[in-house]
Amino acid sequence: MANIFDYMKWRDISLKKVEFNEVDNLILSRLSYFPFDGIINKDEEITIKEAYARTKALGTTGRTLQAEDIDLYPVLAKSIRFGNCKLTKFVNKIELEAEKQFAAITVILPDDTIYVSFRGTDNTIIGWKEDFNMSFSELVPSQIDSVKYLEDVAKKYKNKLRVGGHSKGGNLAVYASAFSNEETKKQIIEIYNNDGPGFSDKVIGSKEYNEILSKVHTYIPQTSIIGRLLKHKEKTTIVKSTETGIMQHDLYSWQVLGDKFVRTKQTNYSDFIDTTITNWLKEVSPEQREEFIDTWFNILNSTNVKTVNELSSKWFRNVGTMVKTYNNLSPETKKMMTKTLSALLRAGRNNITRK
């Protein structure tokens, strides 16, 4: 089976000669995860080739989230198809008080279009917290930033826009496209959501969301979990992955054939997870979800770790700290935690019974 690395060996042809496709979208959605901090100044335009050279000159490949990123970076830099694409307007914000993790980069393509790539959840605790906040909040801070970012790009560059992202980045791509101003919307030709969560009833029912639906391309693996959270209304393409369960969220596991993803069918497991979470959200009020999530992350924060990697590297010590913090919670808070978890387990059990 082939993935994006095999695609790059096969399709290393200029975008001027062979038009942009869905696999190109997946590659550029991953680009926003790359370690461009200190490499690209805010408003300068440099090629991927130049960015990689700067990174290497520092004697490092930067802080990447996945080992595959280290391998993909030079492949893109040396390629005909992407090496001379220009990067600009890189931002990477982590604001603890606002519970915000937001990163994006703009890619100027040789076919005179622009791909705006929104980063998904990184390995910071605050990034995961913002994702969970989507279960009770109509609007999270990174969604606000995504709209402004897209409008700023559209205002500076009059090119046609493709907007995309992976995981939370896919959610941001759809949200920003839907709620940007009319001038920006006129420039958008395609929107890509690669296994990103959906939205609340309010967003799904809005005029703005429904106006851009025809431009949205959503791709999820066959046992998708993240991509089936909350609600979707757009047409969805199911992609074959070589991984299992939640690990299918890893876009490097997505299979390609030529310039398209390998299509497949949704699994019963994904349907089970989707129905269970949907029923749990119906039973637990937004206020209860907020209290539960805030408490859970307060327990995580008691370890003083900032990333998931830090949490797992000293797992036994951190678990001990979390257990101690939990034991010090008030009886009312413990009762709330138990009640909320019980509702989730009950939703799963009832889902099994109905099967």
Image (cartoon, rainbow, N blue to C red):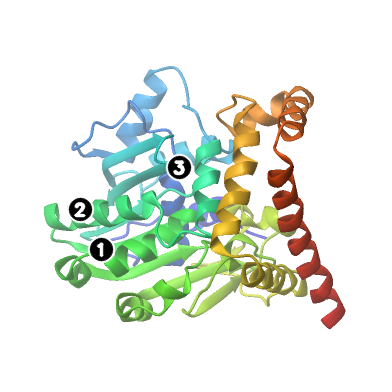
Q: In the visual, does 83 lie left or right of 341?
A: left
Instruction: Report, in whole angstroms, how far the alpha carbon at label 3 lies from the one at label 2.
Output: 19 Å
In the rendered view, would you say 18 is above or below 48?
A: below
Tell me how many marks there are: 3
Badges 1 and 2: C-beta atoms under 8 Å apart? yes
Percent across and percent down for residue 173 are 37, 61
Judge depth for marks 1 and 2 and give the one in front. 2
Number of other residues with Cα within 10 Å of mark 1, as a class: few under 14, some 14 to 19, many 20 or more: many
* Residue on which the image places disc 2: 153
Number of other residues with Cα within 10 Å of mark 2, as a class: few under 14, some 14 to 19, many 20 or more: some
Q: In the visual, does 122 lie left or right of 277?
A: left
Q: Is residue 283 visible?
A: yes
In the rendered view, would you say 155 is above or below 265?
A: above
Percent across and percent down for residue 353 are 87, 78
Q: Residue at x 29, y 44 (%)?
A: 84
Query: What kind of element bears circle 2?
Result: helix
* Residue on which the image places disc 1: 161
Q: Looking at this view, is 322 or 330 the one in front?
A: 330
Q: Residue at x 41, y 65 (%)?
A: 192
Badges 3 and 2: C-beta atoms under 8 Å apart? no
- Give me the disc on residue 33: 3
Q: Residue at x 64, y 71 (%)?
A: 278
Which is more N-terminal, label 1 or label 3? 3
Badges 3 and 1: C-beta atoms under 8 Å apart? no
